[in-house]
Structures are given as C-alpha cells and as structure tokens.
Image (cartoon, coloured by chain):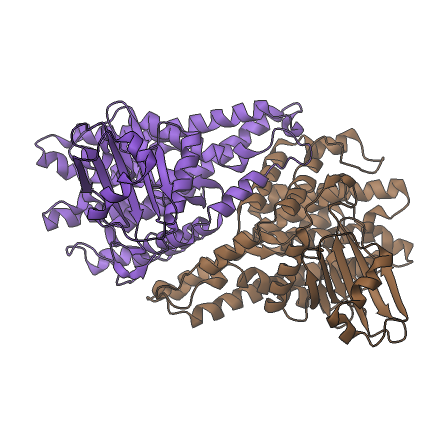
Chain colours: A purple, B brown
Amino acid sequence: MAYRQLKEELVLDYIKNLELMQKRFSSFDHISINEVGDGNLNYVYIVTNKLNPEETVILKQAVPYLRVVGESWPLDIERMEFEVMALRQEYEFCPRMVPEIYFADSEMSLVIMQNLNKHTIMRGEMNKGKKFPKMPDHISTFLARMLFKSSDWGMAGKTDKWPYHDSAEKKKMVKKFINKDLCNLTEKFIFSYPLCDSDTNSYTTGLTKEDLAEIQEDNELKVKAALLKYKFMNNAEVLLHGDLHTGSIMVNEEETYVIDPEFAFYGPAGFDVGLLLGNMFLAYIAHSYRQVELGNDPYEYRKWVLEAIEEIWDGFSLKYDKLWQEKESEDNYPMWDYPGGKEAFRMLRDAEILRIFREAVGIAGSVMIRRTLGLAKVSDIAEIEDTEIRSSLDRLALKTGKQFILKADSLNSIQEVLSIAKEISPLI
Amino acid sequence: MAYRQLKEELVLDYIKNLELMQKRFSSFDHISINEVGDGNLNYVYIVTNKLNPEETVILKQAVPYLRVVGESWPLDIERMEFEVMALRQEYEFCPRMVPEIYFADSEMSLVIMQNLNKHTIMRGEMNKGKKFPKMPDHISTFLARMLFKSSDWGMAGKTDKWPYHDSAEKKKMVKKFINKDLCNLTEKFIFSYPLCDSDTNSYTTGLTKEDLAEIQEDNELKVKAALLKYKFMNNAEVLLHGDLHTGSIMVNEEETYVIDPEFAFYGPAGFDVGLLLGNMFLAYIAHSYRQVELGNDPYEYRKWVLEAIEEIWDGFSLKYDKLWQEKESEDNYPMWDYPGGKEAFRMLRDAEILRIFREAVGIAGSVMIRRTLGLAKVSDIAEIEDTEIRSSLDRLALKTGKQFILKADSLNSIQEVLSIAKEISPLI
C-alpha cells in the first residue's frame, strides 16, 4: 500500500483489514488505541481489545521527518526497513529478547509486533528506584550473542572449501545494513554537535562557559572524540542495535527485552556496550539526588547500579569469549594447530575483548557528554526540576564522561572505570 | 551482449563491431592481437593496427574462475565491474595516473582501455636495475589523493544544512565497492594460508621447518597477523586499489600509471601503502644478489630503493596532510574554531597519519611473508635460479616481514623501518 501517514483515527481501519490481525483479534468492536511514541522519531500505537486485553499489538510507523524537530528535518522512511531487518536478525540470535514481528509493510513503513504489556521501559523504572537483578545477565547475553555472532569471528566458515566464503555472508550483511540516515543522526548528535558550539545544543542554565570549554575546547578530548566518531563511521564490525540506552530496554522481574533497533547498522564492537554503560553511569549520578528525593539513603541503590554495570561487562566478556571458543572448536581451520597455538588463540581473544572494552569506555563518555550538552536528554537527570541540583549533576556527568574518553585507551578493567566514576561522584 | 569468453580469434571480431573502435582504428586489415595477461586472473589482449601502432587499445576480460588455479576455483565475473568503477573513480581523483577507459561491457565482463605502450611494468624494470626517480613523487600523489579524497575526512560535507549528509556519499561508495570475491582472495592468500600449514603454500626447498615455525608458530606474530586480517575485513575507510604492488605500476622516465584495480574496495587506509612498501623491500632484498648478477656493486641501487621508500612515505604523509588542511579551510564546521583549536586539528592529523603508517608497516610485513611462503611469488626473488641463494633471500624476507609485523605498533618514523630492513639485510 502506498505510503500515507496513519493518523490515530485510521489505525483501527488499517488493522481491521489485515487478515493476520483478523485472526489475532476476536473482535474489533471495543478496540482502544493509544499513541505512546517517545516523540523523537516515530508514531507508536498500542492497539488492544478492551474486552480481552491479551489481544494486543504494537503498530509503529515512521514519518518522513525527524519528529522531534519537525518537517524541516526530513528523514527517509526506509528506516523502518532497518528496524524490521534488525529485529528479525536479533530474533534469530536472541529469541525472546526482542519483540516478535507479526506483520511488516515496507511501503507504509510500518510494523505490527508483539506488545510487551507485561514489561516496562527500564529507564522509567530505574528513575523510580527499581532494581532488576536479572537484567545484567540477560543484557550481557544479548550483547555477547549479537556482537560475536554477527562478526567475522563469529561468521567465518566452518570449511575452507570453495565456494564457501569465510566472509561473504558477513559482507552481504554490512551492505544490507548501510543505514545512512540514522547513522548521520548519531554522527551529528552524539559525536559532533555536543563537542562544539552548535545551536542544536541545549543545556541547563546553571552550566557555565567554563563548563562548556572543559569539553568543547580541550584539545586532547576533541581529538579522541573525533577518532571515536571516525571509528563509528568506518569500522563495520558487528550488527549493532545502535541506540541501546536504558529507554530501549523493557523489563520485568523475570525478562528483559530490547526494542527499537531502527539505528541498526554494522559498526564498531564497543558501541552498544558503551551506550548502555554510559546510560547506567548517568543513572548512578542521577540517583545521588533521586534517592534523597525518594526518601532513601542513596548508597544502596547506587551501589546496585555500579554492580549492575560490573555484571554487564563481566557477563558480556565471559560469554563473548565462550562463544568464540565454541566456534573455534567447530572449525577445521589449522591456524592454531601447533604447540602453543591454544595460548595464541587465547591472546587473540583477550586482545579483542580489551579493545572492545576500551572502545566501550570511550563511547560511554561520549554518551554522557551528549546527553548533557546535546539535544536529546535523559529523564534521569533532565526531569529533576531544581535547576541548581540539575546543573551540579550535569557537571558530574560531563566530568565523568570526559575522564572516560581521556583515559579509555589506558584502562584494563571495569573496576578502574567504576573508580573514575566514584572519584568524581563518590558512592556514599 | 551475453557473456562468452573471447578467445583470441574472436577479439578482432568483437572490436570491429564497436562503433567507438571504428572511430579509433583507421582500418582493421592489419591488426595484431597479443595476449599479455600475467595469468593470475584475467585475459588481457593488446590490439594494435600494425600500419599505425598509435592505434592501439587494451582489451581485458574476466573469466569465471581463478585463472592461475583453474575452473575448480570459480570467481564471479562481476569483478570486472569493480575494475571499471575503480578506474573511473581513480581517474576522477588522479587523472593521467590510471589508464583511460574507452568502453566497458559489463555483461561480457570486459573493458577496452588505453594501451600504455610508452610505459613498462615497474617490477620487471626494477629487476633489471632501472631507477625511476620521479616515481616516488607520482605514486605518493596517487596514494595521498586516493586515500584522503575517498575517506570520511575528505568527503565530509562543506555545509551542515539538511539534507546534506556528511557521510552519505561515502557510505554509498562503501556499498558499491563491497567486493567479496576478491577480498576473499586477499583474506586467504595474504592473511591466512601463509600463516599456517596450508597446502596452497609453496616455497623454496631450502627453507627449513624451523624457518616456517618462525612464522607459523610464533604466538605474538600470529595474533598480530590475525588482527591485521580483521582490520582488512572490517575497516571500510578508503577506496583502495587493493593490489598495489610493483607489478601494478607502469612507468617511464616521466610518467607513472597505476593499473589493474579489480581488487578495489573500501578498506583500511594503510593497506595500499603497505603493499607497495612491502614489495619495494622485497626488491631491496633481491638486489643484494641481482646487482651482483648484473655486475654491479649492490650498494648504489639498493640505496636508491631505500630512498624511494622513504620518499614515497614522506611524500604521501605531507600531501595527505596538505589535502586535509585545504579541505578544512573550505569547511564551515565550527569543530576547531576556538583558541588552540588549530593545534588540536594538527594533533588529529598527526594521530591519523601515524596510525596509517603503523598499519602500512604491518601490511608490508604481511606481504613479504605472503610472497615468500604463499602461492603467488614476486619475480624479484622467485626468478633467481640458484636455490641456495633464493632460499637465503627468502629467509631475509621472512625475517624482515616478521619484525615489521611485531614492531609496527611501536614505530614512529620511516627511518626506523629502514633500520630494521638494514639490520637484517645490511646495505653494504
């Protein structure tokens, strides 16, 4: 069907006419439709049969512009294709960790999928002080599987016999996931604008010229940030979610789902990990105040946030390493078949995991800066009303982000990263 | 026209029927046709009007298999598309440094182009001890323009106004140049087989088990080589020639042309530079004997080879840096507009050039090893008849290549690279 924007009043009509939806819904007489998009990019409707709330789907449609800015910033609606392709690939690698797709209409640039109605967005729940003890284990599994299985390490052929390619399938994936519009957003809104004097930037009035100069006029930081951007633009290593912050994760006590992969593309292996850790560190900073507001001693919740960060990294690196060893044991390639070869293979894995770690720390820093000076905020800090408190938290976020970027290449363990954060915003 | 292999007797027929060729040739009555392909991949015919030798073209056709191996190694004939696309792009960036295309037929997987009949393949001329004093300047210009102008640094938009993308054009290029078949050859024949016990390897009988183990069982070397391969497979930075050895360069006293870019793809910036330098170092090693054979004291020619290497690198890095500064001065992006920003921009350029340098040194090492242990040899050494001499030169090539790979990441200047080569094979 040719593209037209499905205003709320047209959603029911559209759904009704789909055979697949006629099977899913016992009746369309008492349907509720609620728009729940976060307002940045797309329209997202929850469609539910009020008589049987288990009959429920999400309908998500892209509009041909950046919703948060308006029609003056056109965006190709083909981006929904990327979300659909990515969800399908993620579903293959990590079933039951991403919503199931029921129906996709590429001309309409829309997708109908599983409504995760027993789950809530993690960021909002964390803002309220909720802990999710199983999340680090789940999310580190998601990261390890995605990052390993989509890489050349994970996709190399079992056999070397022609015409089997070691790398052809992965190269086809890279080609399919060239996602220029949404990568362009990341390049600008994470890696460029917040690092210089751009009128798209926006920040708490309490931040001073000096605070800005600490970021935008620090030569070492600027160079490292430019190189992180360059890596983002060039290193087509793994299929990334591309926007894996705590608002892209839906949780309950038992399950963790990753949603909204429209930014998916082949990029540097540290990116998703770094995005997530950066957002967790922002929560750590926010809760020095949020917990007080909730009437608690901040220590306990903030300690949990740091433990979760540690558990995510440790879980990821162990699982990634294990997947690689399993892959190698299925392989018949003689690269490591010699006395001492096992040790070399271990050295290679260690080197790669360290590289991903350092990349992730740099990205975590970039994200903390971007969420403080750039256009898109995180509610963790931005929804704190007191300007003075907000700007003091902003300052901690900037300082921590800066140190992450400056020190990333010399760090060797997640404990060192936690120490930097605790030095700037003590865990007391 | 549907694909059929143009055997020699059919070439004239094909040419005759092309309107463009009817304009180029005054008559087809006295045409000579000579097959001159190097035998690895394609058939290459020189077509000349014997009555007027200025009326001459090259016709190059791909066959659907790896010619050097035979029909048992099928290769997609689409590879000629890559050669044509690459030649056109190179011609845009570096006119008069690549042959001009007269006609391309993608279904027939063939191209008709300028016959560089006043030029000869540089490798053969170097084997005879000829110097090409202008070549380093020419080839460093070619490298600087290609590597800078095809990169994100060189292709970033002048304006930030929507819908102008900083990176969209470059991403389209990456997509267009996903060259899986020929990248697969490089991945296997440069980065995999020579580093392990593969029956595609072939080497001088004089090399011992210990010589092989020095390469194939050295843990540090193996890990570094694996990481170089991974970079080759993942870092889609610049449009590479992909096979820039001294046999892909045609020269005379005044001009330098680069031919045969069918391996072209978007890869790591150090690759072409490293390939060329590795081949020059092989010539340096070969001439410790070749010059004696030619009746000369080896010192002078080998000194020229080292000077040429130095001049290529210095020329490249200076020109690359200059292109970047020019680009930046045309830009209106405020990234470096602050007190001290110029210095940061210089730091960034220095960091990038150093990174390219180190990558190139690692690649040079890989190439020296591959040309010694792998399937495809270089005539510089391989055509020396005396097995004992050949294996002693092979050993020098392996040692030098190994040290390049091991030390690449700690080197800072081309002089240090020359010192390694001279330490292993003294310039006396």
Q: Give how far across and how far down residue B64 sits, in percent.
A: 73, 46
A331 shown above or below A48: above
Classify residue B227 as left or right of residue A416. Answer: right
| Residue A331 found in image quarter | top right
Q: Nearer the viewer, residue B79 or B30?
A: B30
Q: Give how far across and how far down residue A15 sits, in percent.
A: 27, 40
Q: Nearer the viewer, residue B295 or A82?
A: A82
- Identify which residue is drawn at 85% across, 74% down: B27
- Identify which residue is drawn at 16% across, 37% down: A288
Q: Nearer the viewer, residue B292 or A150?
A: A150
Classify residue A58 as left or right of residue A385. Answer: right
| Residue B222 found in image quarter | top right
For the image shown, how many numbered marks are present on the structure?
0
Residue A207 appears in the figure: yes
Classify residue A191 as left or right of residue B102. Answer: left
Q: Give how far across and how far down residue A319 sits, in percent.
A: 43, 26
B329 shown above or below A378: below
Q: Give how far across and how far down residue B146 sits, in percent.
A: 59, 62
The C terminus of chain B: image quadrant: bottom right
Q: Nearer the viewer, residue B163 or A47?
A: A47
The N terminus of chain B: image quadrant: bottom right
Residue A361 appears in the figure: no
B270 shown above or below A48: below
